[in-house]
Image (spheres, rainbow, N blue to C red):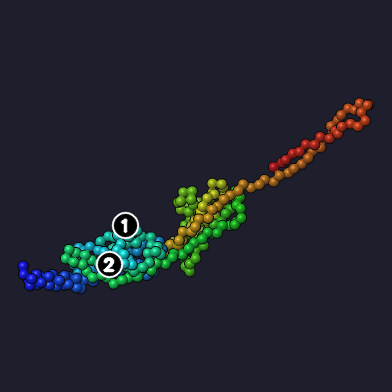
Amino acid sequence: MGSSALALLLLLISILHAGFTRGHKPTVTVTPVSAVFTGETVNLTCVIESYSDWTYEWYKDYIKLQSDGHYPVNRDTLTIRGAAESDQGQYWCRGLKNEGSTDYSEVVHLSVKASPRSTVTVTPDSAVFTGETVNLTCVIESDHSDWTYEWYTDRNSVKLQSDGHYTVNRDTLTIRGAAESDQGQYWCRGQRSERPNSSQSTSAVNLSLKEPVSDVTYSEVVVKKQQSMDKADIMPESTNVTYSEIRY
């Protein structure tokens, strides 16, 4: 093949490649479309309006992402499970085929906000004795008031349900007649139908119980002991016997 023919072939290939990629600039859509909160699942979709059977590449802050447990890729969609503040950044994509690739999409900025924090307060805030009533209150730092509350304990990490022993009334978990088996860590979480759907689970508070101290009565009983005295005795020994008794 002459040099002129080779040059012509290369020109035709470049024209075909340019024609293939021209007009194939993807766009990225993000779900949810509003602010993302920590713990939520985020889907970013790479939309290419023509052709099909693309292979997709995803990038974050100039690093190509690999599909894994945190960033699974399913065809045109990158999913971020349990979004964290470290997932904030710039994302973009492109499509690949044997014939070539598309342009890179425009960059989208993903912003991740911290979900509302929840903390637990305990009443009484001093030592708790067995048999007492204990109230644990879930306080969520949020402007929203339509939360429902979930309570957990480390004994089984299962959500506590209202029953005769545990009563959940809105933001308060009540333990009636606390027993040593109620000792352990407790934490709460808020849920609502609109976003943010969930609060951050609190750092657990440790509930410890003590046995109450019984009232003690101390008494002494003095008993007079009879003793015979010889005529030669000048002074009899003490005839008092003291007994100590502790009553509970």
Taking the spot 57% from the left edge, 50% from the top edge, the residue there is 208
Question: Mark 1 belongs to which amino acid?
Answer: Asp
The residue indicated by pointer 2 is 93
Residue at x 84%, y 32% (from the top left corner): 225
Task: Look at the numbered disc 1 and give the secondary structure of its residue.
Answer: loop
Residue at 42% over, 67% down: 113
Looking at the image, the residue that sits furthest to the left is: 1
Q: Circle 2: is it few (<14), some (14-19), or many (20+) Cα within 10 Å?
A: many
With respect to residue 41, does 4 lie above or below?
below
- Where's residue 244, x and y in %? 76, 38
Residue 246 falls left or right of residue 68: right
Quick one: SS at disc 2? strand
Whole-angstrom CA distance, mark 2 to mark 1, is 17 Å
- Can residue 177 be seen here? no
Measured from the top left, where is residue 226 in percent x and y? 86, 30
Can residue 151 be spotted in the picture? yes
Q: 42 or 144, which lies in front?
A: 42
Quadrant showing the N terminus? bottom left
Q: Which mark is residue 175?
A: none
Locate the C terminus by quadrant: top right
Left or right: where does residue 117 sit relative to residue 100? right
Other residues around mark 1 within 10 Å, as few (<14) / some (14–19) / many (≥20): few
Q: Position of residue 210 (x, y in %)?
A: 60, 48
Q: Along the line of sight, which residue is nearer the eye, 145 or 91?
A: 91
Q: Earlier in the sequence, mark 2 or mark 1?
A: 1
Q: Amino acid at mark 2?
A: Cys
| Residue 11 in which image quadrant | bottom left
Picture coordinates of residue 235, whole percent (x, y): 91, 32
Counting the numbered discs, the total is 2
Q: Is residue 247 left or right of residue 54?
A: right
Find disc 1 in the rendering and name its residue.
Answer: 68
